[in-house]
Image (spheres, rainbow, N blue to C red):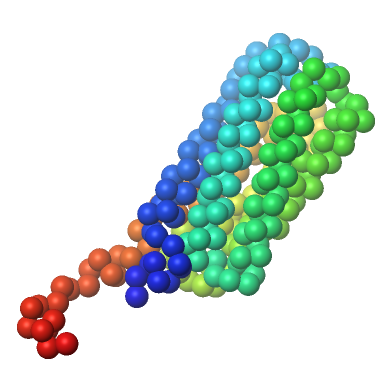
């Protein structure tokens, strides 16, 4: 059995989705680093803090690119079959819906780039961020549990999807909502940690699958064997 018959897709597609996911994680880390080290151009009472509205729009646009690349990783996880069907597929699609919703939140943030903070509009957007992040976390936890159960991925790779989900509840949400005046700094640090989890997912998708490797190591038939069939 080769990986195509096992998952219904070409292994090359899954590897490409892994590279896209890894690229998205790198973009996310870079955006977070810039946010940490850039000198504030506006006060904390502006929604675009620490950027000017224009720079904020650029930053959010890069985050949208980040989300779209991470979506490729989730799609690759589905197509790889590593999470199986049922629970794994439901979890993966839940994570995908959450990421799509989060992408729309980033677009909404661009619209509010010149807004004061907080306002009723920014509060509503923050609620959207929270809901979509929770959806992503739940989805990846379910998909991660399913991935471990299927045992199609081995070693650290088997835990990559679950790590993406647990990071939401153990790092991202506490970092954003529980640190008061340090929310911005802690939020960027937790975002970087979350992106490292997605980088691991991208690397896991890029690995040569055991079934594919086994197929590649299968000894070639001799002419006499082939002629006997």
Front residue of this view, candidates 203 and 223? 223
Residue drawn at the location 78% of the way across and 35% of the way down: 179
Looking at the image, residue 128 sits to the left or right of residue 187; the answer is right
Residue drawn at the location 48% of the way across and 43% of the way down: 20
- Quadrant for residue 94, please give it: bottom right
- Quadrant for residue 9, please give it: bottom left
- In this view, which residue lies farthest toward the bottom? 228
State the image coordinates of residue 132 (x, y, percent, origin top left). Answer: 75, 47
Q: Quadrant of the N terminus?
A: bottom left
Front residue of this view, candidates 155 and 228? 228
Front residue of this view, candidates 208 and 110? 110
Looking at the image, residue 147 sits to the left or right of residue 39; the answer is left
- Quadrant for residue 223, please give it: bottom left
State the image coordinates of residue 205 (x, y, percent, origin top left). Answer: 45, 54
How many numbered circles does the render carry? Answer: 0
Q: Quadrant of the C terminus?
A: bottom left
Question: Vertical placement of 223 versus 203: above or below?
Answer: below
- In this view, which residue lies farthest toward the top? 41
**Res. 42 visible in picture:** yes
Looking at the image, residue 9 sits to the left or right of residue 50; the answer is left
Question: Vertical placement of 179 versus 35: above or below?
Answer: below
State the image coordinates of residue 77 (x, y, percent, origin top left). Answer: 52, 58
Residue drawn at the location 62% of the way across and 59% of the way down: 92
- In this view, which residue lies farthest toward the right? 120
**Res. 35 visible in picture:** no
State the image coordinates of residue 43 (x, y, percent, origin top left). Answer: 79, 14
Residue drawn at the location 43% of the way across and 71% of the way down: 6
């Amino acid at each position: 059995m080769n990986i195509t018959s096992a998952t219904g897709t070409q292994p090359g597609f899954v590897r490409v989705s892994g590279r896209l996911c890894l690229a998205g994680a790198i973009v996310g880390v870079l955006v977070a680093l810039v946010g940490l080290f850039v000198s504030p151009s506006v006060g904390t009472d502006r929604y675009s803090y620490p950027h000017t509205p224009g720079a904020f729009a650029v930053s959010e646009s890069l985050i949208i690119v980040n989300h779209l690349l991470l979506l490729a990783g989730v799609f690759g996880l589905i197509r790889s079959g590593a999470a199986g069907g049922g629970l794994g597929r439901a979890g993966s699609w839940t994570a995908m819906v959450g990421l799509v919703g989060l992408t729309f939140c980033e677009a909404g943030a661009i619209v509010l780039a010149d807004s004061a903070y907080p306002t009723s509009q920014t509060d509503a957007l923050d609620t959207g961020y929270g809901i979509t992040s929770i959806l992503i976390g739940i989805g990846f936890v379910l998909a991660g549990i399913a991935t471990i159960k299927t045992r199609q991925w081995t070693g650290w790779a088997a835990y990559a999807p679950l790590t993406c989900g647990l990071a939401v509840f153990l790092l991202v949400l506490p970092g954003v909502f529980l640190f008061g005046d340090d929310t911005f700094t802690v939020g960027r640090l937790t975002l970087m940690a979350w992106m490292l989890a997605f980088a691991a997912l991208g690397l896991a998708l890029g690995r040569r699958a055991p079934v594919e490797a086994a197929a590649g190591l299968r000894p070639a038939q001799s002419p006499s064997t082939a002629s006997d069939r």
